[in-house]
Amino acid sequence: MLGAVAPLALAIAQPTCLVADLDPAGVAYPSERSLRDLVAGGPRASELRPARRGLAVLRNGGVSLAESRSVVELLIQNWPAVVLRLGGPSGDVPAPFVPVRLLVPGRLFPPQGRGVYQRVSATRLRLPEGGIGLPPAPRRAVAALLALKQPGPSRWLRAWRRVWTSSW
């Protein structure tokens, strides 16, 4: 769930942002066109620039980063902000990599260095050096994001803005 919601939350923290899904095995975001469509047919000029403010999502369609690299680089050059959804750490990503991890009590998910840490309870746990901690996610905000709708204001969404101003 975190792998599907985190890219959307990060994107919504910007006035205009594109989420491009680079995880061919991940949950399919709903969108009219896919990254595979752009790779196969070449992107139209209108798809390289935002048509309006807000969130835009480009589902994967079963294409790898290697296959889509040139299209992804064009999107990064032409959109004011782009979030690339990866299935996990990936080698040669053409953008800063921001790991998003759970921060929960116990030893099942120990903090692993710099990254964004999603708390699942109000418990205060120590963040690793350079980590950004997010408060627990409101259910309404998560439901809105999964429906690709603008969630109402929340402390959780405001916390995502810090990711854009940190150096990765």
Image (cartoon, rainbow, N blue to C red):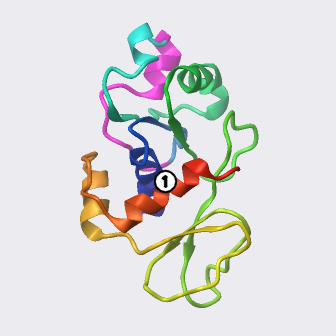
Q: What are the residue bounds of the magenta stretch?
A: 26-42
Q: Residue at x 67, y 29 (%)?
A: 66
Residue 36 can be seen, yes or no: yes
Q: Residue at x 31, y 25 (%)?
A: 52
Horizontal and vertical percent for residue 131?
Answer: 66, 67
Q: Residue at x 49, y 89 (%)?
A: 123
- Between residues 42 and 165, which one lies in front from this camera angle? 165
Q: From this view, report whether residue 143 is shown above or below residue 104.
A: above
The magenta stretch spans residue 92: no
Residue 3 can be seen, yes or no: no
Horizontal and vertical percent for residue 139?
Answer: 28, 69
Horizontal and vertical percent for residue 70?
Answer: 63, 19
Q: From this view, report whether residue 49 is shown above or below residue 141.
A: above
Horizontal and vertical percent for residue 166?
Answer: 64, 53
Residue 14 image-quadrant placement:
top left
Residue 110 image-quadrant placement:
bottom right
Disc 1 designates what residue?
161
Q: Amino acid at mark 1?
A: Arg
Q: From this view, report whether residue 33 is shown above or below residue 85.
A: above
In the rendered image, the quadrant that contains the N terminus is: bottom left
Q: Residues within 10 Å of mark 1 (few under 14, many from 20)?
A: some
| Mark 1 element type | helix
The magenta stretch spans residue 37: yes
